[in-house]
Image (cartoon, coloured by chain):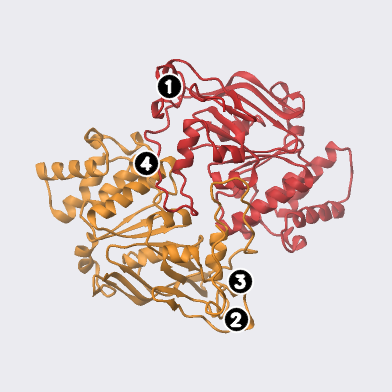
Chain colours: A orange, B red
Amino acid sequence: MTALVEAVGLTKHYAVRHGWRRHGALRAVDGIDLTVPEGAAVGLVGESGCGKSTVARLLLRLVEPTAGTVRFAGRDITGLDELGLRPLRREMQLIFQNPHAALNPRRTLFASIAEPLVIQAGLGGAALRARVEHLMDDVGLPAQFLWRYPHELSGGQKQRVCIARALALEPRLVILDEPTSALDVSVQAQILAFLAELRARRGLTYLLISHNLAVVRQVCDEVAVMYLGRIVEHGPVAEVFAAPRHPYTRALLAAVLPPRAGALPTVALAGDPPSALELSRGCRFAPRCPLAEPVCRPTDPALDPVSHDHRVACLLARRAPASPSTA
Amino acid sequence: MSLLEVVDYSLAFDGFEGTHQVLDAIDLAVDVGETVGLVGETGCGKSVLAKSLLKLNDIPPARILSGSIRFDGRDLLALDETALRAIRGGGIAMIFQDPMTFLNPVFSIGDQMAEVIRARDRADNRKRGARDVRAAAAALLAAVRLPDAAALLDRYPHELSGGMRQRVLIAMALAGHARLLVADEPTTALDVTIQSQVLALLADLVAAQGLTLLLISHDLGVIGALCRRIVVMYAGTIVEDAPAAQLFDRPLHPYTQGLLAAVPDIGRPERRLAGIPGSIPNLLAPPAGCRFHPRCPLAIERCRRERPALRRIAAGQRVACHLAEPV
């Protein structure tokens, strides 16, 4: 599989000021390498504030990187201006967590779905109408919904509208930012099944951002785990979840509560993650890591391969035996 | 003896469009020392029921249609505001999803803790000096495993992380010596590793202090981790009530079965998820008969006409379904 998206050394620092005095830099994303193969579904997981949503916006060039490059379909898009990006916009689409906020309440569904087709494809009249109806059908919504407003729809239906709009221009890459977090589980199951079927049918590439590891396990082939602006582990989802190598991945998996009786999680991590403003030298996870050794404090671990397609940023990963997940 | 006894309780909200029948003939008894989980999707009435226990739903727009709520033998619905104040915090304590909403941003943690401790002292006709109150507050914060409790007393809510704030609210619940702790989605706003810490704390407190717990959540994993008994709600009705292990192994109501089939389980990734077709009913005009019948794969003619009673089907298991057979 060839890489559809390839980020190298991708970095985003936000300047933080107190009054006029420069306070420091918030290192939201700090030098990550991430490859999304064409046709794959890659999950990006991590807790709030780890930078996963910033990565999505950097890949789409919605925010400017501080350093690093992004290649899309083999082409470096880091230096492109808005005009140069415009033809690429149709190839990459973003679906947001909250479908209630992603749709304009004063527009009919027709207007919302038609907009990208008018702007990007120059469609109009009967051709536009037919295309929108086809898209509605594709996402499983009846055609009479076209003239409805978002408030007349349920959450799951609204998310289907957002998917229809994202698909309108036949993108190659769809970035899904917590696409089912605002939905009930019975609706989430419908949307997840639909997204999987859609990917198979259209050969789409997904980058799925989620804090829900069970959802990632269900949808993705690969998973990348982020902690405080860095990717700490990346590999095939079955391998990473069955035998996590990074202590943070292990802690995350141990905290997942399966739908069963009497499975109180073991508290694998004490305390809260530190602020991205006050990162320690060396491994960022060392202050909370149950295995940390003196060597972890001064040395910043690189994301090194432990097997053919499994990479881990931990100095101890090669030594520590891979323990199966407790989940 | 039951600590809490809700009998045939129905509640409606009067709005511009009509009357929403939010709770319909709720029957629920909770014994001393039980851990009961209340689970259901958006709009099923679980939070309204929780608030009803402290008469926190404003009347109007809320209107009690029938039933009674007894706590420790006293009829809560007959109590006046003064008597209710003694129950709130003293008999029943409540913690919510977003702790920031329930902490006053302009008072320090110590001030807010002291207020609860003094209220309890007044109820007990006890007097103590500011220093003793402060020491008691620090002891309570230490009891919920907040590090450096004494220093925390002078901090303000915005200086604390989400997990710390939720612990402060739990400490306040302990300050009033409440016998029943009602926790409404206490970990939904928290990251998973912090969620494990808070759930482990709740489990220890319940065991150590003999608290009775009513935990409300949409997350079957959270409920399964903490509760020995699970009550499932759908569209304002209780559809099933069973010991936790029994509910996960052998759910008898078609809605419970649907809910369990929709939850992704990280331990069983090969299992295909099935959503529940359709969406939740409009409570302005709830379906006649069984409220679940329009979405139920098994519905028969009788389900459309006749409301199923919550019947005891097996040991400790009650189900509101015409088709459930005794096992």
Badge 4 amino acid: Gly
Mark 1 secondary-structure assignment: loop
Mark 1–mark 4 distance (CA, rounded to whole Å): 21 Å
Q: What label does residue A297 carry, if any?
A: 2
Read off the residue under disc 3: A289
The quadrant of the rendering that contains the N terminus of chain A is: bottom left
Q: Is residue A99 left or right of residue A111?
A: right
**Point 55% across, 49% down: residue:** B188
Q: In this rendering, do the residues under marks 2 and 1 share a single chain?
A: no
Q: Earlier in the sequence, mark 2 or mark 4?
A: 4
Badge 1 amino acid: Pro
Marked residue chain, label 4: A
Mark 2–mark 3 distance (CA, rounded to whole Å): 11 Å
- The percent position of residue B162, horizontal first and vertical second, equals 60, 55
Which label lies toward us, 4 or 3?
3
Mark 4–mark 3 distance (CA, rounded to whole Å): 39 Å
The correct choice, above or below, for A111 with respect to A83 in the image is above
Mark 2 secondary-structure assignment: loop
Q: Nearer the viewer, residue A37 or B58?
A: A37
Mark 1–mark 3 distance (CA, rounded to whole Å): 53 Å
